[in-house]
Image (cartoon, coloured by chain):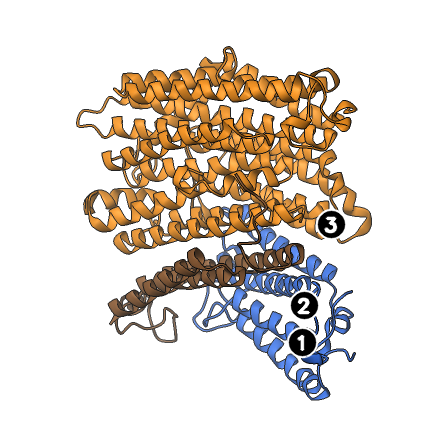
Chain colours: A blue, B orange, C brown
Amino acid sequence: MSEGMTPIVKNAARLVSGFIAVFGIYIALTGHISPGGGFAGGVILAAAAVLIVLAFGRAAAERIFTPSQCHLWDAAGAGLFLAVAVIGYFSGGFFVNFIGHISKGQVGKLFSGGTILVSNLFILIKVAAGLVGAFLALSAFRRMGADAAGGAIEGGQTA
Amino acid sequence: MMPFVPLLVILPLGAAFCVVAMAQVNWMRRLTAPLAIAAVLANLVISAMLLGFGDIRFFVGGWGPESAIGIELVCDGLSKLMAVTINLVALVAFVFAVPYMRRFTKVWLFDSLLLLMIGAMNGVVLAGDLFNLFVFLEIAAIASYALVAFGCEAEELEAAFKYMVLGTVGSAFILLGVTIIYSLTGQLNMAMVHSLLGKVGPGGPAVLLAAALLLSGLALKAAMVPFHAWLPDAHPSAPAPISAMLSGVLIKASGVYVMARIVFNVLGASDRLAVILMAMGTLSMLIGVLLAVGQWDIKRLLAYHSISQMGYVVLAIGAAAQVASRPSPDMALAGLCLFGGLFHLFNHAMFKSLLFLSSGSIEQQTGTRELKKMGGLARRMKVTSFCCRVGALSISGVPPFNGFFSKLIIIVALVLAGHEVLAALAVFVALVTLISFIKVQRYALEGAAADDRAANAVEAPVLMQAAMVVLAVICIVSGLAIVPLGEHVLGPAADALLGAGRLLSTGGAP
Amino acid sequence: MSTGIYILAFAVLLAGLYAIVAKKNIVKIIVGLLAVDYALNLMLVLVGYRTGGTPPILVEGQTPAKLAAAAVDPLPQAMVLTSIVIGLGLTALMVALGIRLYERYGTFDTNRIRRLRG
């Protein structure tokens, strides 16, 4: 049984998934000057990864990102977010925008607004890793019922 | 002291993330349990230290008291009582879990989920505004759904699914209530909402709708009687330390505590709300204990008793609300009702966790939860059966254990408040509780062993024994030490509820 | 106009509650829970609506005072963002539980997933 979908889908996924990922990162990083932010960007980045898993099959995608790596990035993103909040302790209080004390935000500029940009980045990492990890875990279950209509549908599940 | 308040939430959350990260590296996996226990121990030390200081308000991010748009953490007497209870039971449950969870794989998942639940429960009792309360409530709830299903056996999954559906509906009601309150007042901070609602008028239809939705959602979280259907399935199916945490703290921190906060500090105690609380409490007391007597599965019996004892607490809180809302309120009597209710809340956390942990130890050593298949364990498992007896005597209200004092105070307060019928019902429920625990003693601890495995049961591992003994000692001591306990811990807690608006008002001292 | 949308959101909430209460298939119950979640989020966002308001984003040449007078309320939007994330976590957990239930019981029918009684 062939892994993943037809070559047309695979080539299209190869071309498009990079753009989707960049778009997701853009939305996350400009969260403080336009709608979006860390969570929305993370979901879009995860969608790029899910596209790869769907097009190439789970076994092939696992060579690129394994569930263990997803757990690690997930914990790292969340831990760094918490670290940013705790560092604020030393300059005021919990979660204080300590970079904002140094340089106030300017309207429309990317590198302004202090810790909001950094927090968005870490949330991006966490949400993307978390969603990809959840998707990989859910897709590991055995397929429901027997093969339908005798066709070889997308493969990539563990025995 | 103020900077230590958010640590109660940060430490378990940070430890949860570290556990997940450490578990991916093979040689670090064994360190996850000590790290978790260290985090919870630090939490317990901090919450014990906080007991000595007065009321603390902490503004996250420096969005200070002038503009009430920031996130506020409020640590008043009730929060401190709940924080100490939560962290104590959490520490004991974690220590118990170290040998108990060896039968499961991926124990690091259990550690991180339990740490998330503990951090979220600490957040619930510290939250000073409605929406953060809801968020922490949800985090604790989701972690508990996953923990109930941890063993992935068929019955555990079914129980977890039922719990999840009902819990989500309850959370939906709570969110709808918060939405309505926000649309009425434009504020989320609990103190500001209280002062604004006083102007809108306590009887307005929108406020009534919000109150009804909030109370329904919270009654579901606290397993009050029309909404109790998830508890008898979820609590027995979970692994024993999780049952102890769920029955011991989750239904209190996310159910009864939030109900008390909202009725007293947000909506303002009124007669209508008080009658609803008292009715739910009485129904839960009666129906819980009557359904419990006929159970033969030891954990299911304990779960039904949880419903009944929570009925006691809610009845006491409702009586206090009713007394406080009379035209000429007798605040001392309301304080007494609250004292009894909150003391019973603390006691129930102690003895119910003790009972669940000892039933978990029995289940691990004999392999069964059916009372008819056990027998004679008093001779072979001495420490476990001693702790089980202490727990059973405490819950039945036998002096000098702590259950006796708290039930006595509740019954006396009910009589003084003029509800003699309810006091008589409370005494009847206590008798039936005693009957059902005599049954547990007779079938599980005395008598002849009915099964091969029960006949060969040996004592549980040392850490499990240590956890149970700590709780048993607390059960004995807190009954005898009621005077200092009441003065330093319970008195401020009752004051925090009754002096509504005293601390939380914007004019209060920061 | 906004009253009509509130009524629609409430109708979705009721439809979700009906699905949770009356349907016997686990997947349908999950969909009902999702509908309840989305209806609540919609109602929460609607609370902050102001007729003819602008998005609450500060652009060049606008002062915060003018923004506060002209924009919709940003606080419900922050609340809804959090609520959507909570809903996402719940959905993932529900679907995982549903899949595992199918593995153990072999069916999605709640009439046959009934080993716990009493």
Depth order, front residue of C91/C80: C91
Amino acid at dot 1: Ala
Instruction: Name the residue that disc number 3 marks.
Output: B22
Q: CA distance from mark 2 to mark 1?
A: 8 Å
Contact check, label 2 and label 1, Cβ < 8 Å: yes
Task: Determine which quarter of the picture holds residue C49.
Answer: bottom left
Structural crowding at the residue carrying mark 2, measured as other residues with C-alpha within 10 Å and reported as few (<14), some (14–19) or many (≥20): few
Identify the residue under disc 2. Answer: A145
Image position of B271 with respect to B134: above or below: above
Task: Provide the chain ID for the residue under circle 2.
Answer: A
Looking at the rendered image, the quarter that the C terminus of chain B falls into is: top left
Say which of B170 and B365 sits in front. B365
Secondary structure of the residue carrying tag 2 is: loop
Q: Label 3 lies in what chain? A: B
Tell me: residue A112, above or below residue B504.
Answer: below
Taking the image as shown, residue B413 lies to the left or right of residue C109, namely left
Chain for numbered disc 1: A
Q: Depth check: A114 or A145 in front? A: A145
Numbered disc in front, either 1 or 3: 1
Q: Residue C51: percent from the left, percent from the top?
A: 25, 71
Q: Would you call the spot at circle 3 few (<14 residues within 10 Å), some (14-19), or many (20 or more)? A: many
Q: Disc 1 on helix, strand or loop?
A: helix
Q: Amino acid at mark 2?
A: Gly
